[in-house]
Image: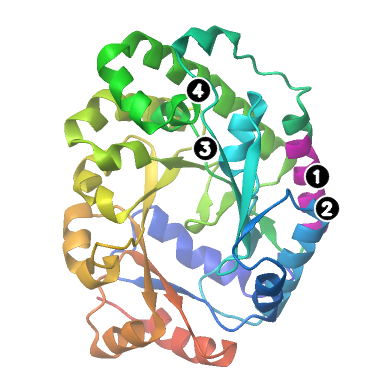
Amino acid sequence: MLAYKPNLNEVLDRLRPLYERRAQNRIFATFSAPSSALEEFGKQYPGVFCDYPDPAERIQFWEKYYRERAKSEDDSIPSAYLSEMDQGLYGGLLGRDAQFMSHPETGWISSMVKPVISDWSEFDSLVFDENHPWYNRYINQLEIFVTGAKQNFGISHFIMIDGLNFVFELLGATATYMSLIDNPEMVHRAINFAFNLNVKVQRTFFEYTSLLMEGTCSNMVQWIPGRIVSESVDPFHMTTVDYFEKWGREPIERILDEFDGGVLHIHGNGRHLLENVCTIKGLKAIFMGDDIGFPPAFDIVDELKHRAGDMPLVLLTDYENFTVKLKDHTLPGGILYHVEGAPSVEDVNRIMEDVREYRV
C-alpha cells in the first residue's frame, strides 16, 4: 500500500490489463490539478540553468507534491522521478561536466552534457568506474529518495541512454550520423559499451528500489508489471525507418531482454516510426509526445490507435478537450490519457466515475 494512493489496489487492477493488452474497450486517465508544490518550485527554479540540487530538497518536493494529490482517484501512481540523472549520469560517468536546468511545469531538474570525446581516437580511453563521483552521486540520491518516499509513494524508473543516444553523448548528433556511414565499426563498439553501462545503471536502480506489487513505477506509464526499463528512439526521429531497423531495433531488443521489457516515447517528428516500433520484442507501451510543428497526438488519436493496433498508448491532452470527447463517447480505448488543467481534485474524482464506466 501507498499512503498517498489510498485506492492503489483498484488502480493497479485497472492498469494491469491495459499493459497486458486486455483492455482495448476501456479508457484510463490521469489528471493534473493546481499544485502549491509546483508553484513554490517555479518561484525557486524559474526555468533557468542551475546547480545540481540537494537530493534531500528534491525528495521533499516530491513528498509535498504527492501529499497534495493523495485524495485523487485517477489512474495515476505517485512516484518520484530522478530527473537529475537523465543524460548527466551517463556522460558524467565518463568524465564530462553536466549542466542542469529546471522545468517549472513539471518540477524536474534535468541534466545534459556536451560531447564526451572530440573524435573516435579518444574512445578507447573511456572507462566505467563504480568509484566515480557521479556514480556515488547516483547511489546517494537513490538512497535518499528511497528513504524519503517511505511507504507514501514510489520511485520511477528513469531514461536509459544507450544505442545511438549514447553515441550522441559521445560525439554529438552530426558526427554520429556521419559515423553510421564513415565509421560503422566504431559505432557498433560504442553501442556495446553503452549496453554494459546501461545494464549496470538500471540493475543498480532495481537493487535499491523495490517493485511495487511486482511492478515498476513509471513517469511514462504510471505503473507496469515486472522490472521495466525506459527506452528511447530519439535519434531515429530524424532518419528513415530503414535506419531504425539497421541501427535501432537490435540494441533495443537486446537490452529489453535483460529485464522484463520496456516502454519508450516517440516525439512528434518520430511518428513515422510507429508501426515498426510497435513490433519491438519486449516493448510494453508507447508514450506519444507532442511537439511544436506537429498536430497534438490527441487530435489524431484515432489514426494513431489504428496504426498502433493493440499496443498501449499514452497521450497528452487538456481538460476541456478530454471532457468533450468523454461526454460524446468518442475516445478510443486501450489508451491512458494524461489530462492537464483539471480545476480541482474534486472535479477529477467526479469525472473518474465516468472514466471507469466508459466502454468502447
Residue that carries the numbered disc 1 in the rendered image: 143
Which residue lies at the image location 46% right of the left edge and 17% below the top edge? Answer: 190
Tell me the SS state at disc 4.
helix
In the rendered structure, which amino acid carries the disc numbered 2? Thr
**Residue 160, disc:** 3
Q: Is residue 204 above or below residue 329?
A: above
Say which label, 2 or 4, has the lower sequence index. Answer: 2
- Disc 4 crowd rating (10 Å Cα; few below 14, some 14-19, many 20+) is many
Q: Dividing the image into 4 quarters, which one contains the C terminus?
A: bottom left
Residue 42 horizontal/vertical position (percent): 65, 72
Does residue 169 appear in this view?
yes
**Residue 195, disc:** 4
Badge count: 4
Give the side of residue 321 with respect to residue 98, left or right. left
User: Are dots 1 and 2 in contact, CB under 8 Å?
Assistant: yes
Residue 70 horizontal/vertical position (percent): 68, 77
User: Are dots 3 and 2 in contact, CB under 8 Å?
Assistant: no
Residue 350 horizontal/vertical position (percent): 49, 92
Which residue lies at the image location 40% right of the left edge and 84% below the top edge? Answer: 319
**Residue 147, disc:** 2
Say which label, 1 or 3, has the lower sequence index. Answer: 1
Which residue lies at the image location 49% right of the left edge and 30% below the top edge? Answer: 169
- Chain part drawn in magenta: 137-149
